[in-house]
Amino acid sequence: MQTLYRRLLALMPRIGVQVTDLGPGTAVVTRRGRPFRATGAGRDTWVLRRTRDGERPGVREGEAVRLGGTDAVLLMDAPDRRDERKLQLAAAEYLCSQHVTAMLELYGVNCVFDVGANAGQYARRLRGLGYTGRIVSFEPTSETFARLEKAAADDPAWRVYRCGLGREETTAQIHTGWKTMNSLLSASDYGKGRYSRFTQADTEEIRVRRLAEVMDEAMEGLAEPRPFLKMDTQGYDLEVFAGGGERIAEFVGMQSEVAVLRLYEGSPGMGEAVATYEAAGFGITGMYPVTREATTGRVIEFDCVLMRAAAAPAP
């Protein structure tokens, strides 16, 4: 049964009011395309939210912050409700996704290699932001792969492979039960101190393939492949990259999770990883924090986006 809130949103366009539904319980309501002041969003824009007990009906206290000279407005809770760390990380994830999507379009990418796909979150985000090209996702663990396969089932341009990628073709034991942080590497002392999940000792045997060996199959049918490599393998990205061999030169761009503070034994530091990527012809276009220490503010990992400038379209 439709709630009163939803019925109200559905009626507003009939009286010339534009509604942007931001999700459960939150919407932006605009009259005549001009800002409208109600909660700080502007003179002609209301922010309509479902309220909690004791709050004023229709609105919740907060403010709107204009992002530089753009037309974008960030809707903020009242200062006493804000968590700076969560806000920064959420903003970084959003900006990273927007930037990657823009780079895919600029460089004419038509095949994204999604290595360390988990349940398909990255691929679904790309689809939501308008990328329509091929996606090839790799996830080695049985339970998570079943969720990935289900997510991709109705998308003919999304292929999935149950395997990991590495420096050589082999089998290996991967640590499981670490949720989105399953890894072929053991947890470091720092990692164990930060995440209690690392105390679990479950493993699963998986197949590991080389990136160079799967590329032809993954890009089959593409007349002029322009691939992009995304890696999120919990400390194993350089091993995946090494498995590309000389065929790494075919990628027009890439994204890698690089570590400032190492969660896994034997994983490379950020400097080593970035130097390897730059030596292969890629240049950084964006760096976005993935996790931060709540007590110190230090960044633990960044999402690093790099593109091959030589592959950029002519102006």
Image (cartoon, rainbow, N blue to C red):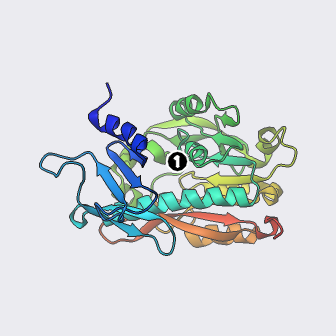
Q: Is residue 183 visible?
A: yes
Specify the quadrant that holds the C terminus: bottom right
Please state if 47 lies on the left or on the right of 232 as rendered.
Answer: left
Q: Residue furthest right?
A: 223
The relative height of residue 187 versus residue 83 in the rendered view (above or below) is above
The residue depicted at 78 percent of the width and 66 percent of the height is: 312
Q: 237 and 304: which one is in front? A: 304
Q: Amino acid at mark 1?
A: Ser
Residue for point 31% across, 24% down: 1
What residue does disc 1 label? 183
In the rendered structure, the answer to whether residue 270 lies left or right of residue 37 reads: right
- Tell me the residue at 71%/71% (across/down): 278
Residue 265 % position (x, y)? 50, 58
Residue 175 at x, y percent in the picture: 49, 43
Given the current orientation, which residue lies at the most extreme top position?
1
Q: Residue 84: give x, y in percent of width and height.
A: 32, 66
**Furthest-bottom residue in this view:** 69
| Image vertical order of residue 122 relative to residue 308, above or below | above
Judge left or right: residue 91 versus residue 206.
Answer: left
Residue 69 vertical placement versus 202 (above, below): below
* Residue 225 or residue 246, whichever sits in front: 225
Quarter of the image holding residue 63? bottom left
x%, y% of residue 150? Answer: 56, 28
* Residue lying at the far front of the rendered structure: 15
